[in-house]
Structure formats: C-alpha cells, structure tokens
C-alpha cells in the first residue's frame, strides 16, 4: 500500500463507520476520519494510532450543513492529503411514523444522507481520478428494496444512494474510479439501535449483523470493484425472496408488520437511552445506519 | 459513617461490606433472602431484606446513608428470562440512582466491568478507548447501558464514580461456577486444565483486596462523573497457570484448546444445562470473549486514586493458601 494515500470515512466515530475505520487500519490504510464534534472521534483516532502503524487525521464536521462539506474538502486539500478511497457512510436513520417526525429532522436527514454524499463525491472526484486507482463506497441500505413502514424517508434517501451509485458507476466505467454501494440489513451499531434490534422478531433478529463482521465484507467488495455489496446470507435470501414472492403476499406481510408496529405500546418501546446520547449529541443526529 | 452497599451477597460486595464494617462504619446491606448463606456477618452490618428492583425497599435501606456502593448485578452470560438482565442491571441501577438522589446521598460508586470495553488489540485498553466489537451478551450490554445511566445522574446532581473490574480472584465467597478461583482450585488439585489456544492470549487478573481498596479510593478520591479501571496484571493464560505451578508444584496438565473445541464444548454444555433446567455461565457466543486479548491499563486509577495493584505472585500465593484451607 502506498503510504501517502488516505481513505476518507464519514460518520467514523461510531457504529459501522468505526468498524470500517478499524478494518481499513487493519489493512494498513491511512485514514481521514470525519464525524460530528465530540470526544468519540478523537478517542478512536488515538486508539487506531496506538494499535496500528497508520496515519490518522481526525476532522470534526457536521456534514448535514452543506458548507461543512466544502470546508472538509478544503481542509483535506490544505493538508495536502491524497485521498484514493472515499467512504460516504454518515447518515441518519429513523424508525418512526412519518407524522411523528419534525420538519427539521427530515431536512437534516435528507441533507446528510443525500446531499453530503452527492457533494463530497463531486468535490473529491477530480482528486480521486488524479490519485487513482480510486474507490468510492456509498453506504445504502437493504431497506431501499423493501418499502417498510416507519422507514419512509430513510428508505427513500437510501434508494437515492443506490441509484446514484449505480448510475455514477456506469458513467465512470473505464475510468480509474470504481464506485460500489453496500446495502446492509440491520446492524448493532450503538446501544439504542442494539436495544431496538433485540426487540424484533426472531426472524428479523437472525438477519441482524455486527458492524465488525460487515466491515471486512464491505472493504473486500469495494477493492474487488463489486457493484452492489449485500452482506450476510440471510440478507441475500431476503432480497431473493423479495424478487420471487408475489406482490399480494408482500402486501400481507407489510400489513402484518404495520399491525405489529401499532401494537407496540410506548411503555415497551421506552427510549431509555436517549438522555445519555443527548449528553454529547442530540439523539436524532447520531449517525445510524440501519 | 452510614454506608449502603448493594450486592453484599456477591463476591465483591461481600468483601467490601466486611471491610467497611471493620473500618468502623455502619453498613446497611440489601439482600433478597435473609436466609442466604452469603450475607456478611459483622456487628456493624445491618441487613435489610429487599431487592434493587423494588424502590420501596431501597428507600428503607438507604435511609440516612451518606455513601452508596452499588455492586449488585446479574452476573452471567445467559438467563432463561432475557429481560432479567435489563430488570436487574438497568432498571435496578436506575432505582438505586434515583433513590440515592432523592435521599441526599453524597456520593455513589458504581461497580462495573471491563467487559464493557471488550477486546483489546496491541495495547492495553484505557478508559477512553472505543469498543471495537458489538455487544453479543446481555450482561455486558446491560452493564454498558447502566453506565450511561450513571453518567446521566451526574447531570441530575448525583455525585458518582464508575469502577471497571477485570477478572477478580482471591479469598472470598464463591458465587460463580466458572471463576478464576475455581479454575485455580482445579489446577492445584491436579485436574486437567484447558486454556484458550494460543496460550499467549493476554487477560487481566485483579486481586480482591485491591478491588476492595480500589472501591474505597474511588469513593474517597474519585472525580465526579469519571470512570476508573481497577485491574491487575496483564498476563497470558499460560503464564498465569505456570505461576501457580511454581507456587504449588501442581502436576496438572495445561492444554491449549482450539476455539472450535471450546465451541463444541459450549454447545454440549448448553444441551446439558437446558435439559436440567439450569442457567448457563458459558455460551457458544461467549467463547469469542475468551479467544481474544483482554489487556487493561489501571494507569488512571494508579495516578489519580493512588491505586496499587498487588504483584501477581503474592496475590496468587494468598489465594492458593485460602483455597487450600477453605472447604470444597
């Protein structure tokens, strides 16, 4: 590995982003880690520097603000860092009824999931070409193939990521920039998401993976220039079933799921963890990938 | 001083309550069954029957107490009732915190586990290091949630300190079938002992006397809202048992078991325990927890609290003397 090249990962301080950072460090890649301001980013970069022989640059940025994406690019350019792998991982998840979400939440979600990915890809494209062979990994979601209740906006943003990645890949075919999209299913990314995952049905729980197991699959797939990366056998099976089962059956399953969601009483669904995350960030802007 | 201790029928809580009483404090302990054999007996120890999952009993037992040591937890890897971990380790902790705040407790020390940090890589883990794997057992998961609750209560105005213990050994009551003490006892009795392969995997072993002292230091000098690792030696499994061999000249065979063996054993153990309706202290998933480095640095506690871990050989000698003289 050329020691002057860097892998840039957004949303790196927690969950899947952190797992990706550790996986890249394990493979000897230098890192530019970007995350919301907070101690987690710095403790991760110190941890990686202590345990792996790679260079780590930590940059605090809230990428849901468009200007910060531009600033990030300027910072990287000023530091003269040659990025050859861009991983657009930062994103905000949601699992609630559309009517329960605020306008500002959806704005932030679309801004981060859609705009930050688009802007950073555009901003870094020229330098990626210059530092090639280069790779772009966009983090989509399995949920963009299923039209899940309570995941309306999230699923839609991930559909954008899927379309954008595949389309851009076609456009860049023959160039030295390779675009991949990974569509993971549920992952135990942080305490509150893990808690939600534990409450799901056994079938859904079976599909839940740990970020540290998905990250190697992601980087392997990226370096092998795979177009779409679906981690996990169960997730692949879900996707296969989705293409073969008839529409009316899907409707039945969706209806059943909706009933289950509605029967979940607020008491059972206590968001006990929210206050603790509010200590460092407002709960709704923690980067979650689901 | 009047002090409240939860988990006094547990290994650490029991030793801690006795130490506090010996130091002349008046110690209130909360026990689920007053018939338990593990209740520390001392004239300074006052026994209250109750449960941390019941706030009313906590209010009674914490009345007029200035300090609280919350050592009670459900410590195992698996339970028939999955919600039990949440009820005891999370809701129980929230009850203790809420009542402590309400009754005007001056400071609370929360006993947690290095398991919340997970595996280490090259360097021993420190308090600020991130966890590199997801939680796959309910014990560590619920202890981690409990830690975030404890930190929340700092904002609410309760003075708290978290101490994270590694693998504790040394003289005391036996409350867990797969403890370092039990493994040590089997080894000095000449029984075949399995350690993970490679035996060079590092673990952290801490001595009960240090842990008790560490709790008192955390109460005395610990900074509100901070967390301190109370560990001991970072030592490989092979070196740990070879140190015991040097002290006892045990003839026990030490065998490095590959991971798949441990997994197969765990699967058989699962069948056996499930058929007999018993709880599990070892699981197939739990095997992963043993087959990795678990090195921790007690540097922060040493620098800030004056924590002084006993040198491993001396600690093992005391433990072996105790194990040889205690009833099986």
Image: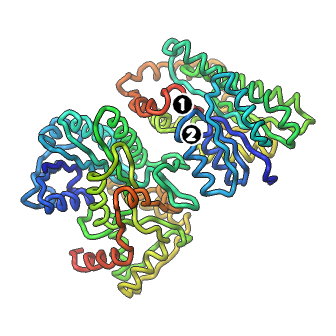
Q: Which colouring convention does the figure follow?
A: rainbow
At a point 80% along the width and 35% down the height, the residue shown is: A179
Q: How far apart are marks 2 and 1 (CA)?
A: 9 Å
Write down the chain letter for disc 2.
Answer: A
Disc nearer the start of the sequence (2/1): 2
| Residue that label 2 marks | A14
Name the residue furthest right.
Answer: A174
Can you tell which mark lies on residue A286? 1
Residue B107: x and y in percent read: 25, 44
Residue B245: x and y in percent read: 41, 83
Dot 1, crowdedness within 10 Å: few (<14), some or many (≥20)?
A: many
Q: In which quadrant of the rendered view does residue B180 lie?
A: bottom left
Q: Do the residues labelled 2 and 1 touch (CB within 8 Å)?
A: yes
At a point 12% along the width and 40% down the height, the residue shown is: B63
Q: In this view, does A160 lie above or below B301?
A: above
On the rendered structure, is B218 left or right of A24?
Answer: left
At a point 15% along the width and 60% down the height, the residue shown is: B40
């Amino acid at each position: 590995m050329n020691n002057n090249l860097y892998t840039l990962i957004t949303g790196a301080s927690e969950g899947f982003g952190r797992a990706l950072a550790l996986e890249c460090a394990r493979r000897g890649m230098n890192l530019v880690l970007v995350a919301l301001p907070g101690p987690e980013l710095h403790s991760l970069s110190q941890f990686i520097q202590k345990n792996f022989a790679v260079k780590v640059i930590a940059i605090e940025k809230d990428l849901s603000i468009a200007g910060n994406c531009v600033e990030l690019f300027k910072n990287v350019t000023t530091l003269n860092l040659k990025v050859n792998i861009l991983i657009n991982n930062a994103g905000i998840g949601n699992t609630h009824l559309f009517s329960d979400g605020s306008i500002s939440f959806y704005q932030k979600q679309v801004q981060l999931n859609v705009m930050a990915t688009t802007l950073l890809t555009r901003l870094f494209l020229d330098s990626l070409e210059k530092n090639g062979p280069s790779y772009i990994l966009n983090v989509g979601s399995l949920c963009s193939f299923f039209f899940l209740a309570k995941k309306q906006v999230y699923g839609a943003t991930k559909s954008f990521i899927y379309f954008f990645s595949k389309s851009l890949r076609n456009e860049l075919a023959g160039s030295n920039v390779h675009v991949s999209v990974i569509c993971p299913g549920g992952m135990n990314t942080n305490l509150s998401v893990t808690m939600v995952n534990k409450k799901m049905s056994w079938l859904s729980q079976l599909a839940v993976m740990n970020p540290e197991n998905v990250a190697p699959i992601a980087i392997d797939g990226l370096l092998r220039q795979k177009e779409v990366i679906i981690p996990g056998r169960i997730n692949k099976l879900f996707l296969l079933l989705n293409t073969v089962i008839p529409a009316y059956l899907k409707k039945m399953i969706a209806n059943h799921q909706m009933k289950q969601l509605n029967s979940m009483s607020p008491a059972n669904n206590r968001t006990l963890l929210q206050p603790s995350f509010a200590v460092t960030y407002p709960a709704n802007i923690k980067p979650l990938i689901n | 001083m009047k002090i409240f201790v939860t988990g006094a029928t547990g290994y650490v809580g029991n030793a801690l309550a006795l130490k506090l009483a010996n130091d002349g404090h008046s110690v209130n302990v909360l026990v689920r069954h007053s018939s338990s054999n593990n209740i520390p007996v001392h004239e300074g120890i006052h026994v209250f029957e109750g449960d941390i999952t019941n706030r009313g009993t906590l209010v009674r037992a914490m009345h007029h107490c200035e300090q609280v040591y919350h050592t009670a937890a459900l410590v195992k890897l698996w339970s028939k009732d999955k919600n039990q971990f949440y009820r005891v380790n999370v809701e129980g902790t929230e009850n203790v915190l809420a009542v402590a705040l309400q009754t005007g407790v001056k400071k609370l020390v929360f006993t947690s586990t290095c398991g919340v940090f997970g595996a280490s890589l090259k360097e021993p883990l420190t308090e600020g290091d991130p966890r590199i794997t997801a939680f796959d057992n309910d014990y560590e998961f619920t202890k981690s949630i409990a830690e975030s609750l404890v930190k929340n209560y700092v904002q609410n105005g309760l003075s708290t300190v978290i101490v994270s213990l590694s693998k504790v050994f040394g003289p005391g009551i036996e409350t867990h079938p797969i403890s370092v003490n039990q493994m040590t006892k089997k080894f000095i009795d000449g029984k075949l002992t399995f350690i993970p392969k490679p035996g060079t995997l590092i673990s952290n072993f801490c001595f009960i006397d240090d842990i008790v002292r560490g709790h008192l230091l955390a109460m005395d000098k610990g900074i509100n809202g901070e967390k301190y690792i109370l560990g001991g030696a970072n030592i490989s499994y092979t070196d740990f048992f070879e140190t015991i061999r040097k002290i006892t000249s045990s003839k026990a065979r030490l065998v490095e078991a590959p991971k798949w063996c441990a997994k197969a054993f765990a699967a058989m153990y699962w069948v056996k325990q499930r058929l007999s309706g018993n709880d599990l202290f070892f699981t197939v998933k739990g095997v992963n927890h043993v087959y990795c480095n678990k090195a921790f640095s007690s540097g922060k506690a040493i620098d800030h609290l004056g924590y002084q871990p006993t040198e491993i050989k001396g600690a093992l000698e005391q433990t072996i003397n105790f194990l040889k003289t205690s009833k099986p």
